[in-house]
Amino acid sequence: MRWGRLVLAAAIFVFGLAASAVAGPIGDAVFAIEAKHGNAPHEVIRQLQALEAQARAAGGDDLRIFLAAWGYAHASIDKPAVADAAIEELTDLGERTHNNAALASAYTLKAAMLSFSGQVRAAFGWIESAVPLSETVGSPDLHYWVTMTAGDLATSNGHIDEGIRLFEASVAAARQSRNPRREAQAYQCLAPLRLVKGMFDASIRDAVRVRELGAQAQDSSLVISGWVLEALAAEAHGEKEHGVRARRSAMALAEQIRPGADPKLNSQASGVGGLSTEMETLLSLSGMYLSVRDFDAARDYAARARSHAEALHDPDNAARATINLGLADIGAGRLQAGKKAADDGVAALEHKKRDAELLIQINRYAAALERAGDAAAALQRLRESLLLETELARRDRQSTVVALQRESSFQQRQRQMDKLEHDNTLQAVEIARRNTERLLMLLLAGAMAIGVVVAWRLYLRARESNRQLRLNNETLEFASNHDLVTGLFNRRAMERDVVAMNGEPFSGAWVSIKQFGLIVGSVGHQQGDNLLCQIAQRLEEVVLQCGGQLYRVDGVTFAAIYRFAGNETRLRKTLEALTSAMDAPFKIGNQDLIVSIGVGASEYPTDATSVMEVARLAELAKLQAHAEPGNSYVIYDARMGNTQRDKLHMETRMLKALEHGDFEVYYQGQRDLRDGGIKGFEALIRWHDNGKMVSPAQFIPLAEESGLIVRLGSWVLHQACRQAKAWADAGLGRPVVAVNISPRQFNHPDFMTTVRAALQTTGVDPAQIELEITEGSVMDDAEASISQLHALRALGLALAIDDFGTGYASLSYLRRFPLNRLKVDRSFIMQLGNSEGDDTIVRTVIELAHSLGLSVTAEGVETVAQEATLRSWDCDVVQGFLHSRPSPAAVATDLLVTERKGMPAAA
């Protein structure tokens, strides 16, 4: 439906790159390439590659124009990763240099990219941000590009009135730049919208303006388009003779341009873009009537468009018209007839090619089915959409890696440059001061006779250096007592204020943001800082209203000091005010985020005998609040200290057990569902404490909390590597041993060193070791995790996501992780056959993994029925009590020996 408008956007794109600043030679070269090869994006990309180095060296508007053209060309050939990289650079250029033209170009390019992939609602959100920015630049060229794109997206979202307003703004921008071709193109978009709204006289006037302005621009295709629009508007108004005259004029002009063309089949055969053919115009009108739910009119125009397409032997447009015909029938209640027509159109497009256009049409079809109440058919189409999106995403995997590397390199260079600039400023001031003072002393001692003039000049230089040093000291003094991100007082300022209270009773509250790492992994560090500032502003307002002072003590933790104590009712109201401040969502970019906090409080001298003890007890209460869902607060109670002592006691016992060798690695077998053989084992840690087995559920969470999990994980990894090497040396094959890696272990700075040391000291084949990493581990900092996962794969190790389905990994990140396997969590397997929802999730995960080239292991398989179901869904490997329980290494070895001899093994 929107293809004609997208062609029109591509045709005018190069004109919108210009801004208030005059483009340099690089920008002019980009304009020339777009003008010559605008309809051939692959050729545009090839020509632009030769200009990249010069554009980056030139910077400014030359770089902005290059990035906009580069990103638009890649977006039009379904390369979203490269387009995203260009958008990021344009955004950074705009924010660093306060260049609204760059920001408007970035947002418009993002909207175009989303529009190409069918995400017209999200695209409209971005273009709404670009319109006011383009108005501040003072460039009619840029404003024309932005408003034309915005009008197209508003129309696609069914906002016909908003589309008319934006296209009228495009007319004004084109008229200001004195460009009749652009003004004609804007009227060309306005005419069908007014026709759909029933404004027939205005639509006819717009069509006449298209013809007149097209003639001024010497563009025959625009003149023909004006005649066709005038004919359609006159026919809709009941002026049949007027419509016939206009159509004959269109056919006569088309015959002059293309002699021999059949005017009965296509009265605009010479058109090259936009609504330059009657068939494209009919298709566009059909889509607009669908947007305003006028299904009879939509069906009429779709049928006429299909007749034109079939007569011209144009299968693509015939398929699109057939889909519009089906959607009109579905909307009018003729479900079966509509589904048949839409199915035929989708099948025709799929037979022709599998690209973003097919994805757009499938999503439109699914939305229509959902509105009609046919949920099953809508779900089927949504599954096809997911598979096609995955297929298209796989094609872009290599470009994604390149874009990520470029982004990471740029951010690293920017941080290095900022640090060097700060250090150089301080050093330069200090060196200047010392050199000046030394020179002053030498000159005064050796050449007093030079006179007062020379001494005075040197004195002035010394005073300037001292002034500069004083200013820098004041800056450093401010930085030493304030947080640079939020502007709040920091921990040092808090300690200073508490000491100044001189023993006066007070209450201390510690506030921590829950799952902030996951939020940053989703929105990025820049938006994460923005969110942190908004949170700080809300908290500070509440704290000041309650008579306190707010501080930021570390990354995600704030502290509040209140000058009262011993009043529990007042303290609870104060803490409730803090948690209530987080109820409303935060606006970050184009999305709303709900943030939860945990608050812990203690009082001096009620709970603690020293100021530092108040902080420790409040932190302890905050940790307990963090374990509760949503916004929560906890006031310190003496019983919390007992719980903490129990944890410390168990932590001490674990340290001794690690030193005395009381830990042991058990192995649980994994069986291949295709041949029934042992695929490998999962290494599981067990603790023998004074003859009793301690459940991992008791000591693993504490080890993770205390950091001891890093030592335990390293020990398990070494033991697993030794056992895998022993099995290989004994001739028992090369079974793969899976080792669980905890989030804290994965994110530890020495993790890569530990892995390399385990492989080198044991001599094991890396292909025998598979590292199982939870979703939460890699999503805390997804970009850093991608780099580390690639480094692990480079060592030859296999990688798996453990407990898949219980975490936060999105499809966009999953396809970028260099994985070998997904492990479905046992909680889903336990409900197989009992929960239709869990059945759907497991089957979908298996299909998704296979579409990404990954194998699947199902955990917790305990019954033959579960295994049979998983086999029917093509699951690769099963693990559970049905075949093998966790056992010592000797029992696992016997299991391998038995299988090597060809004897059946006991489950």
Image (tube, grey):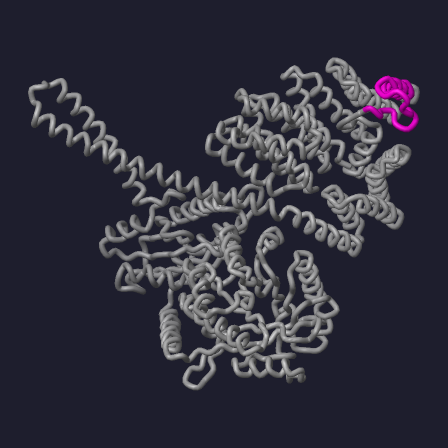
Question: Can you tell which quarter of the image residue 650 is in?
Answer: bottom left
Regarding residue 830, the answer to whether it shows in the image is: no
The boundaries of the magenta stretch are: 244-270
**Quadrant into which the C terminus falls:** bottom right
Above or below, comparing residue 753 to residue 665 in the picture: above
Viewer-proximal residue, 793 or 630? 793
The reply, left or right, for residue 369 in relation to residue 603 is right
- Which x, y percent locates residue 237? 87, 24
> Extreme bottom residue here?
691
Above or below, comparing residue 730 to residue 229 in the picture: below
Viewer-proximal residue, 145 or 50? 50
- Which x, y percent locates residue 628? 49, 63
**Quadrant into which the N terminus falls:** top right
Regarding residue 358, the answer to whether it shows in the image is: yes
Residue occupying the point 10% across, 19% down: 450
Residue occupying the point 51% across, 76% down: 726
The reply, left or right, for residue 500 in relation to residue 212 is left
- Which x, y percent locates residue 634? 42, 62
Question: Can you tell which quarter of the image residue 589 is in?
Answer: top right
The reply, left or right, for residue 825 in relation to residue 461 is right
- Which x, y percent locates residue 230? 83, 21
Q: Is residue 264 magenta?
A: yes
Above or below, comparing residue 400 to residue 187 in the picture: below
Above or below, comparing residue 355 to residue 72 in the picture: below
> Extreme top residue here?
216
Q: Is residue 809 magenta?
A: no
